[in-house]
Image: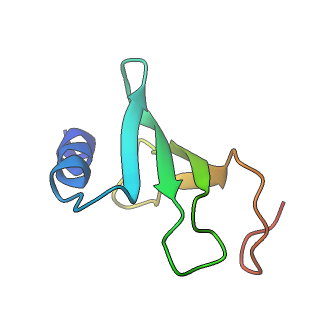
Amino acid sequence: MKELKELQDARKNNKGPTVEANMVGNDIRHWKGTIFGPSDTPYHGGTFIVDIEIPNEYPFKPPKMKFDTKIWHPNISS
């Protein structure tokens, strides 16, 4: 499964406390991601949760992502 390899790669390539990703239950197509606010930015110290749904047609269709954590950013709509 391509999704499992992607999840393993995300965990292996993590070089610090910036991003995490985990499956929701046993569903390989539903993940929860955590983004830790980078230092030297207004988001420093923040923790932001992202809901990630991977379609059956992946990698030909992209994952759908939405922030569970309220966040203001000019490129993210409510």
14 or 41: nearer the eye?
41
51 or 70: nearer the eye?
70
Q: Quadrant of the C terminus?
A: bottom right
Q: Is residue 20 above or below residue 18?
A: above
- Could you say where residue 18 lies in the image, as x and y percent from the top left? 39, 60
Compared across the picture, whether 1 is left or right of 33 comes to: left
- Could you say where residue 17 lies in the image, as x and y percent from the top left? 35, 55
Compared across the picture, whether 2 is left or right of 44 comes to: left
Furthest residue in direction right, as rendered: 78
Q: How many labels does the image show?
A: 0
Q: Quadrant of the N terminus?
A: top left
Residue at (69, 44) in percent of width and height: 68
Residue at (46, 60) in percent of width and height: 62
Q: In this view, does 19 lie above or below 76?
A: above
Residue at (18, 59) in percent of width and height: 13
Q: Which colour scheme is used?
A: rainbow
- Could you say where residue 60 lies in the image, as x and y percent from the top left? 37, 61
3 or 61: nearer the eye?
3
Compared across the picture, whether 72 is left or right of 61 comes to: right
Residue at (24, 50) in percent of width and height: 6
